[in-house]
Image: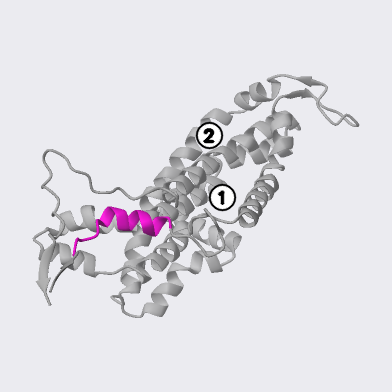
């Protein structure tokens, strides 16, 4: 007696589509990956509330920046204009803005790789007296800022260090604890097997660093660079004491404008300009870390003139029983 058994293979593309379209019992037409309406509404409401919480304090600054006259008890300015912008530019806000950008970038470029190397050495236990080295690295965060800056200023003055160089040195020392901590968290979960596998396959040390190691730790490096940029961008005390008035950055202009001229529009313009670069970097960092949408389909294999032919399904065969 002969019978026919179908042993045709299952197409992997059909299996993937069926797995993506798997449904829960009782949910007619609802895919497993689609979120429920209540959870989605909760996320939207929480996002809106958090955005308002952070955005509302900047609304008075935006109004003051373009207010030529705003007095009590009016809720809105009586007249709008650009007098505040002109006053801020006349007080040197533009040059101070560029100087702050340059200072923050220099601190970022120096402190980020130093923190990464220190974090790797501490994580891999390649440093003698690890606890002592860790305490020294994190001492700028623990020590009182004003006392530490005054002591370092005396040393820098006696060593004839230029003010700008001294400001950079001290700001890098302050930024290294933040970059080291951020990179240490990343290296604690980093697998050295990727580097070893690349070298086993014939890659050089430089090629392994640029093509394997750095791409894998790029998100952590971006976070560390953002923290170092914030240290160099928003500092006031170190720049004032070590710079001795010769290094005028945007925080110094804001402080002098708030305490000296009494022009609220000018202070609002400089304060708002000090917030814009960190917000731009934060948005860029968040966008770079955003994964693909969960509902996006994976790229399925497709036939092309250069691609090999797909494996044909198994043929039917006859079995005698």
- Of all residues shown, which one is farthest toward the front? 1
The residue pinned by badge 2 equals: 97
Side of 319 where 267 appears, left or right: right
Which is more toward the observer, 312 or 182? 312
Magenta span has 266?
no
Mark 2, residues whose alpha carbon is within 10 Å: few (<14), some, or many (≥20)? many
Is tag 1's residue or tag 2's residue first in the polypeptide sequence? 2
* Label drawn at residue 195: none
In the rendered image, the vertical position of residue 206 relative to residue 283, given as above or below: below
| Classed neighbour count for the residue bearing mark 1: other residues with Cα under 10 Å, few (<14), some (14–19), many (≥20) | some
* Viewer-closest of 87 and 66: 66
**Residue displayed at 40% across by 56% down:** 20
Horizontal side, residue 276 vs residue 76: left or right: left
How far across and how far down the image is residue 167, in percent? 47, 49
- Could you say where residue 128 lies in the image, as x and y percent from the top left? 31, 79
Q: Quadrant of residue 182?
A: bottom left
Looking at the image, which residue is at 19% across and 61% down?
8
Q: Where is residue 113 in the image (x, y as percent from the top left)?
A: 34, 56
The structure residue drawn at horizontal position 57% and vertical position 47%, both measured from the top left corner, is 240
Asked if residue 169 can be seen in this view, the reply is no
User: Which coloring applies here?
Assistant: one colour
Q: Nearer the viewer, mark 1 or mark 2?
A: 2
Residues at marks 1 and 2, CA–CA distance in whole angstroms: 19 Å
Query: The C terminus lies in which quarter of the figure?
Result: bottom left
- Between 197 and 312, which is closer to the camera in this rendering? 312
The residue sitting at the right extreme is: 73
Residue that label 1 marks: 241
Image location of residue 222, percent across then percent down: 40, 52
For the magenta stretch, what is the residue range? 7-21
Q: In which quarter of the image is the N terminus?
A: bottom left
Residue drawn at x 65%, y 46% as measured from the top left = 51
Task: Looking at the picture, tell me which residue is in the foreground, 99 or 78.
Answer: 78
């Amino acid at each position: 007696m002969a019978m026919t058994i179908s042993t045709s293979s299952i197409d992997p593309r059909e299996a993937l589509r069926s797995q993506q379209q798997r449904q829960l019992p009782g949910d007619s037409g609802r895919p497993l990956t689609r979120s429920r309406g209540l959870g989605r509404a909760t996320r939207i409401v929480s996002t809106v509330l958090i955005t308002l919480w952070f955005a509302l304090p900047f609304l008075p600054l935006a109004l003051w920046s373009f207010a030529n006259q705003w007095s009590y008890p009016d809720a809105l300015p009586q007249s709008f204009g650009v007098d505040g912008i002109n006053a801020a530019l006349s007080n040197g806000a533009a040059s101070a803005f560029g100087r702050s950008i340059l200072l923050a970038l220099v601190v970022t470029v120096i402190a980020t790789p130093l923190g990464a190397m220190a974090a790797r050495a501490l994580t891999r236990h390649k440093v003698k007296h690890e606890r002592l080295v860790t305490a020294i690295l994190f001492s700028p965060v623990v020590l009182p800022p004003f006392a530490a800056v005054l002591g370092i200023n005396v040393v820098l003055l006696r060593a004839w260090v230029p003010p700008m160089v001294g400001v950079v040195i001290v700001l890098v020392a302050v930024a290294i604890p933040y970059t080291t901590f951020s990179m240490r968290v990343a290296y604690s979960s980093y697998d050295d097997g990727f580097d070893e596998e690349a070298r086993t396959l014939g890659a050089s040390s430089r090629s392994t660093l640029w093509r394997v190691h750095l791409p894998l730790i790029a998100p952590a490096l971006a976070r560390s660079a953002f923290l170092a940029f914030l240290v160099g961008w928003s500092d006031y005390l170190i720049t004032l004491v070590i710079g001795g008035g010769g290094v005028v950055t945007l925080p110094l202009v804001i402080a002098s404008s708030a305490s000296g001229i009494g022009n609220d529009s000018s202070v609002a313009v400089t304060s708002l300009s000090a917030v814009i670069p960190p917000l731009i970097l934060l948005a860029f960092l968040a966008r770079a870390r955003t994964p693909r949408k969960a509902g996006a389909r994976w790229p399925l294999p497709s036939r092309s003139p250069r691609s090999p032919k797909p494996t044909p399904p198994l043929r039917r065969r006859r079995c005698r029983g």
